[in-house]
Image: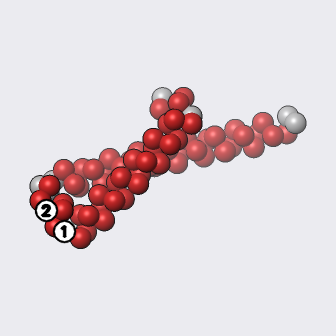
Amino acid sequence: MEHYATLIGVVLEKLEQTYKDLKFNYEGLDSILKQHSLEEQANTPELLTIAHLRDAYGEFIQSVESRFPGIKG
């Protein structure tokens, strides 16, 4: 079963990179939203989409962090 150790290492390395990408995208989307009022966000279709995307990224991030707490490092 040792031959799986390399596979696990590669997958965990990819997960760590994916996590960093998720965080980067989340922070970028959040930054855009912070430039607009809540009223603008609620009444602009593009900003609503950005908010939904940001929220989805947030959910992905929370899921990864809960399953792999060491990834936050």
64 to the left or right of 46: right
Q: Point out residue 7 in the picture as x, y percentages from the top left corner.
A: 75, 43
Q: Amino acid at mark 2?
A: Glu
9 to the left or right of 56: right
Q: Going 52% across and 48% down the picture, which residue do you hit?
A: 18
Residue at which label 2 appears: 40
Q: Going 18% across and 62% down the picture, which residue do you hit?
A: 42
Is 8 above or below relative to 29?
A: above
Q: Nearer the viewer, residue 58 or 15?
A: 58
The residue furthest right is 1
Q: Nearer the viewer, residue 65 or 8?
A: 65
Using a 10 Å C-alpha cutoff, classify the residue at mark 2 as few (fewer than 14 neighbours), some (14 to 19) or many (20 or more). few
The dot on residue 13 is none
Whole-angstrom CA distance, mark 1 to mark 2, is 6 Å
The residue furthest bottom is 45
Q: Point out residue 26 in the picture as x, y percentages from the top left corner.
A: 36, 49
Colour mode of the rendering = secondary structure
Is 26 above or below relative to 43?
A: above
Q: How many dots with numbers?
A: 2
